[in-house]
Amino acid sequence: MSVSLDDIENSKCLFVFGYNGADSHPIVARRIVKARQKGAKIVVCDPRKIETARIADQFLQLHNGSNMALINAFIYTLIEEKLYNQEFVAKYTEGFDGLWDVVKDYKPEAVEDATGVPANQVREAMRTYATAESAVIMWGMGVTQYGQGTETVKALAALALLTGHLGREGAGVAPVRGQNNVQGACDMGVLPDLFPGYQSVTDPAIREKFAKAWNIDPDTMDPEPGVRLSLVPHLALEGKIKGYYIMGEDPMQTEADTSSVRKGLEALDLLVVQDIFMTKTAEMADVILPATSWGEHSGVYTCCDRGFQRFEKAVEPKYNVKRDWDIISLIATEMGYPMHYDNDQQIWDELRELCPIYYGVTYEKMGDLGHVQWPCPTLDHPGTPILYTDLKFTAAPSGKGQLLANQWRKPAELTSPDYPLVLSTVREVGHYSCRSMTGNCAALKALADEPGFVQVHPDDAHKLGIQDQALVWVESRRGKVITRANYNERVNRGAVYMTYQWWIGACNELTQENMDPVTNTPETKYCAVNISTIDDQRWAENHAAQIYSELKARLRNAVEEAKPATASIA
Amino acid sequence: MEKATVVCPYCGAGCKMKLVVDNGKIIRAEAANGYTNQGELCLKGYYGWDFLNDTKLLTPRLREPMLRREKGAPFETVSWDEAIKFVATRLADIKAKFGPRSIMTTGSSRGTGNETNYVMQKFARAVLGNNNVDCCARV
Amino acid sequence: MNRFILADANKCIGCRTCEVACAVAHRADGDVTALNDANFTPRIHVVKGGDISTAATCRQCEDAPCANVCPNHAIRREHGFVHVLQERCIGCKTCVVACPYGAMDVVTYQTTRNTGAAVNVLVNKAQANKCDLCHTRDQGPACIEVCPTNALRCVDRAELEKLSAEKRRRTALEAGALYI
């Protein structure tokens, strides 16, 4: 995000689009609550009446899959009502003329049917946002997990550029990153097109710099961007990917269209899984490399506002496990590239030297409770809480903010008589990601457990004859799972919501892969499903409990029944 | 009793907390006054650490290196030495036979931290000779 | 006047951190890792409706219906709250029916009881479960301590008077404005 969490609390207007802080980041939601207490205007755009919508000045309950149409109507309004900051646009942006060509067909009155939002609400929202002293646009997966995610993000950025809500205290853009170190993984170049520090792999000078530091011939480096994770199953089926070394990820749970992922993993010659728990992905591995967990090692994470923070080791690892980077170094060495590190700081200092924007982030500066935000280019630099304060947008050679809009495209898989409901996948507040960690925590398990839930509006439920808390089947063109119906008056009619943490009520058995062409993010916010009731609820309860205990037993046995090879030979 | 300052391993809010350790075991988590969380935590921060005790409530901890000699065979526990040699040999074979781009690696957006992510992309770029490294930034 | 815990629905985000804190605070061992489906019996409950998220718990009524109806005189107003003497509770659930806030719950747990003839038997013991303001906890109510949005607070006479004064002032000014 371009701002800090402090700015969210101190902004005069929060424009929240497809982001449910209460469930995905309670401690960020807390800042939204505090902003509200301090008098900030809050506008929420979401198909569900999320917690933030309850305390909002305005709640625009748009149809699922209509994000781009609504944002184009916003841009239309800014231009038509001359709400945009003409001086800012002239000085710091380019592409204004092209915008109108795209949005001219999105008059708020003309797109009411597409978005479900009354035109006066669209106009009112833009008047609030444009005239606020400062404003932050917050967004989350409700924007990016669509086939048109990247274009939608650019259009949201256009709102900020048109109004000049950027580069100041309380003004900016805030895509709130989900996992504790997803920002860090990107910062460290765990992206197929970028070295650490957001340096391009296609730039020969950059390759040469890294090659020199790593003591290799730059010609052995690949000058082309690599493969994105979401494309691997298909490439494996095509025979283009043969070996897959997965570390600390569980695609069998978290990636869209599980059956496709399963087929892809089965087609591999070699699957190496390095993890802390026996996940459904680890179960399929040829080799399992057990690693130390959070709590058993130290290091540095990057949080959602670009802040580097250190964490310590709390307890000694009890098992025959190794630190992740130690395992990788041993494999590298065995493959003929000597690699060895004594500790985390040695690695940190190596990468600081290679990444100008992190160079000033020393261990000393981070300290015990410190938080240093990149860019931090020099040793005496305090870090950068707010990006773009110089109003230079270096992504374009001109240094100007790019105003981009695109025609709205409908989601890939629309509802039909056989699959009349939209399924959108969301998050559970008390569980996290693939749930291998939180599912093993007593209190969090007591709060919510398998087979998970499908949130459905009571009106839809009544029509379908579904009782609250009854077990039901949810089915898409790709799969069918059992889960518990959860009446929820806050969800819109015609759509149902499942949290992606459940291993039995696993929504990714149902989701589909229509991907954003730029990021290859699958459209997990939209696919078509149906729900059917189960007459014999006693059978259903037994069935759900049984498949859950079978799954747990299978995973437990995979670990506990593994014996040394010599024993079996003898 | 000791206290270790950590960052919560769950969402991206970056909450600082103290793990209170008694006799080598964590007994509770306390909120610390970090920049982002200002002395507050949510339920996952306060009550989300006991997976470290290998509770097996959902799935067991991986305790030993393991491998299958062939597809479908059960896991065997092996020494680290053997596991590392096995992986290195197989990866080298695949690279030799199908080229560097036939191998994919991932970093991790979770508890391992930035150092490991740096080392993994270095492994892909310097050892395998490709840019096939990615993370679950899309889930 | 008894103090009581009040939630501000404008701050509550429905995360249920308070429920877990309550359950942990009322375990003799204080051990979060010992919680499970059966013993997870918080005395504060998050309630979510179409337009509201808040936490509901005992109001520590001055003339408490639960205390008035208890046939075994197990519920008393003492120590500044409505106190259940658990050793007297027989689990009859009359208090649950009487409570207008749904803040009372009867739960059972297994315990060993000495029959007096040197024989210990496993019995089901009932317990009327309600907010006791964590009266044995030095730091005060656990739910208030953990709430990430500070939506919970303990209201005493002074606090209540302040709330009322503010409402009186607002009403008076609004009414006054109408007659200008």
Image (cartoon, coloured by chain):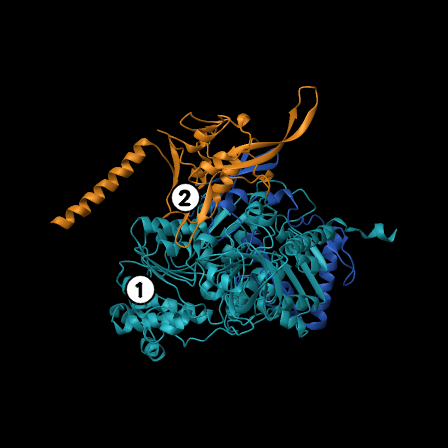
Chain colours: A cyan, B blue, C orange
**Is B65 on the left or on the right of A512, as rendered?**
right
> In the rendering, at what x and y percent does residue B67 appear?
75, 56
Determine the residue located farthest toward the right in the rendered image: A570
Q: Quadrant of residue B105?
A: bottom right
Residue A82 got which mark? none
What is the chain letter for disc 1? Answer: A
**Is C139 on the left or on the right of B58, as rendered?**
left
Q: Is residue A281 above or below residue A514?
A: above
Q: Residue at x 78, y 62 (%)?
A: B70
Question: Which residue lies under the disc numbered 2?
Answer: B38
Task: Tell how many labels.
Answer: 2
Q: Which residue type carries mark 2? A: Gln
Question: Which residue lies under the disc numbered 1?
Answer: A125
Q: Is residue A497 visible?
A: yes
Which structural element holds mark 2?
Answer: loop
Q: Which residue type carries mark 1? A: Ala
Q: Nearer the viewer, residue A11 or A143?
A: A143
> In the rendering, at what x and y percent does residue B4 appear?
53, 39
What is the chain letter for disc 2? Answer: B
Mark 2 is surrounded, within 10 Å at the Cα level, by few (under 14), some (14 to 19) or many (20 or more) other residues, namely some
